Amino acid sequence: MVDGKLAYGATITLEEGSVRAGTEHLKRVTAGKPAAAPARWNGLIGEYGWDHNILYVLEREGKLYALVEWFFLYPLDELGPNLFAFPKSGLYDGEKLRFDRGGHGQATAVEVGGVRFARRPVGLSNDTFHIKPLKPVGALRTMAATDGLHISPCRGGGRTYGTPTWMWSVAVDDAP
């Protein structure tokens, strides 16, 4: 039941594999793992530019995108192996993106509107986002299964605020 300053009265009921919200019946849908990005784009996906002006190139649902100016996400049209274009609308109306690739197939820069964005050293190796657990994986799995993880933020010098905060975690696939 929703009961607050902005709304009240709608009944929300949990059912086997679904939720009923008022008259709407929302069934759980199993989303499969998305297909891998085409191999020809692997060396292009990444970050380019400076700390104050990052151009992100990413794949989403089988299409290459550019995230510019922090929150403008544009689908790119592929014109050639290293040549793409912004859509004919928005901030970069039809502008071309030309990628320069190094000897290993990785893009070293992308040029947009005469401005060269150098590749940032993020995501260039497979272990960039690897996190080394500080506790044995079995102990972490036990904590995740029992929802028994509590932390206490530290002040300078390692002193804590004294009141542990309950945290919840999400186990992803069969990650080690």
Image (cartoon, helix red, strand yellow):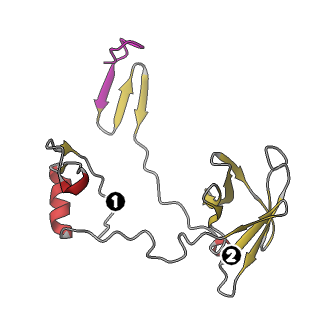
> In the image, which disc is placed on residue 172?
1
Which of pointers 2 and 1 lies earlier in the amino acid sequence? 2
Q: Position of residue 78 (x, y in %)?
A: 78, 64
Between marks 2 and 1 in the image, the one whose residue lies nearer the viewer: 2
Residue type at numbered disc 2: Ala
Question: Which residue is the site of mark 2?
Answer: 107
Q: Position of residue 76 (x, y in %)?
A: 75, 57
Q: Position of residue 167 (x, y in %)?
A: 24, 46
Q: Identify which residue is drawn at 43% across, 68% down.
A: 129
| Residue 62 vertical position relative to residue 154 in the rendered view, above or below | below
Q: Is residue 131 left or right of residue 146?
A: right
Q: Residue 10: within the magenta?
A: yes
> What is the residue that sits farthest to the bottom in this orientation?
103
Determine which quarter of the picture holds residue 5.
Answer: top left
Is residue 39 or residue 140 the one in the foreground? 140
Element marked by disc 2? strand
Which residues, given as a range, are shown in magenta?
A: 1-14
Is residue 41 or residue 163 the one in the foreground? 163
Q: Identify which residue is drawn at 35% across, 11% down.
A: 9
| Residue 105 vertical position relative to residue 119 in the rendered view, above or below | below
Distance between the Cα atoms at labels 2 and 1?
A: 30 Å
Q: Is residue 158 left or right of residue 106?
A: left
